[in-house]
Amino acid sequence: MENDFHRSVSSRAARRSQLQQTKGCTIPVANDPYNIVIPKKSHEKLVQRLSYIVEDSATNGSQSSPLFGGHQTWQQREESFKIKPTMKVHCGFMRGGGEEMASKDIEYVKKCTFVVATGIFDAYDAPHQPSNISKRSEELFCFLMVVDEVSLEFIRRNVSVRKDSDGGQWVGIWRLILLEHQPYDEPRRNGKVPKILTHRLFPQARYSIWIDGKMELIVDPLLLLERYLWRDKHTFAIAQHKHHRDVYEEADANKRRKRYARPLIDLHMKIYRYEGLQPWDQHKRTPSDVPEGAIIIREHTALNNLFSCLWFNEVHLFTPRDQLSFGYVVYRLGGLFKFFMFPNCEYNSIFILHPHIREHSSKIEWAKTMEELKKHPELIESRGGLGLWTPYPGNLDLVVLPPVARMSKAG
């Protein structure tokens, strides 16, 4: 693993040059971050008060431990999609469910109103330092790298980590934020917590830019906020997927690439089909139902926070493939959630994409049939995806998934 890390670092310059020449398109960003005027907070009309369920009611009087995302009932899930001025929803972080942050880090992030966040879980990636960051952005933004115990140990072995006078740990510009007691068996599902629930981890943040751990940011974050949010008065921006616009196409690709158990992806999609999610076509209001989720740029409005909660709840209940559930939540909110989905070529101009340190694989990804999963229950996650094993209040036997056009290779 250590050799892989050093090979990755040594080839970075050559890969940067190659990628900049062969991928991406010009991003129409402003010329100077020092001339950007930060606007006032957006006025929220639809949701005025949003609060969160923090006690896992299913554990009352029982011996089972709380789930990080709670034991949400089908009725609670249905009610959560009905937007009202005052709402209280599941949104992870159940008391006793895991993902504890040290007190020194809790204090540090209280000052963070502008955040660039990334995450490394299961030692899957190496830290990448952003470039082209202005002094103004260095002073304005907190650069927060969320890690689990395994990744922190890996970073300490391979990178110089410094400690400040308060005990905070740093790798270059990144402040390391350790989350202890991971809530899920599947590291990919653990990684969705800081990615989707950024507003819960960093509640004082007005704006956040999430980037996946494999990405090296090469554009000043203030220029990104101006381009993707403020210029056209958006509050949430995400890139369009490179290959797929239709959720059912993306699900098919996930099965072919063994991203999760094939029968459970099918079950996930049957639930969405039963609940009315249509295949994407040009008559839909959005350019695609499938995002490239490696970057999320958002203002932390109440409606955006609600969307993030609902999105995470789907990831908690079903498969951890967040690209399958994004378009479904957009559909359930009936056009009330507005967002900017920008061209994928711009996404490729914001970052340099680095390879993972190692290939990720989990046992459940190789299951081909429900019979195989039932015969080998050790393959099944114990704390995530439980909606796939909870009796569904509808007859899914007659659901037929729509045919898909395969727009990408299986590899």
Image (cartoon, grey):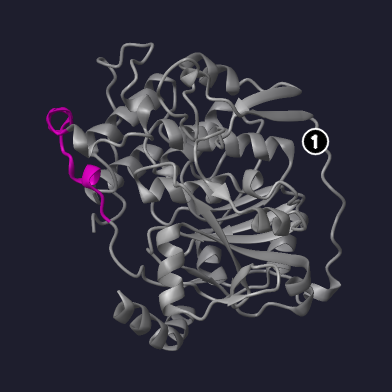
Q: Is residue 195 visible?
A: yes
Q: Mark 1, residues whose alpha carbon is within 10 Å: few (<14), some, or many (≥20)?
A: few
Residue 378: quadrant of the picture: top left
Q: Name the quadrant of the C terminus.
A: bottom left
Residue 368: quadrant of the picture: top left
- The one nearer the camera, 137 or 160, is 160
Relative to 394, does residue 103 appear above or below in the rendering? below
Magenta span: chief secondary structure? helix
In the image, is residue 370 part of the stretch drawn in magenta? yes
- Residue at image position (25%, 15%) is 397
Q: Secondary structure at mark 1?
A: loop
User: How far across and how far down the image is residue 236, in percent?
Assistant: 66, 48
- Residue type pointed to by label 1: Glu
Q: Name the quadrant of the N terminus.
A: bottom left
In the image, is residue 179 part of the stretch drawn in magenta? no
Q: Which residue is mark 1?
A: 44
Relative to 358, does residue 209 appear above or below in the rendering? above
Magenta-highlighted residues: 361-376
- The one nearer the camera, 168 or 7, is 168
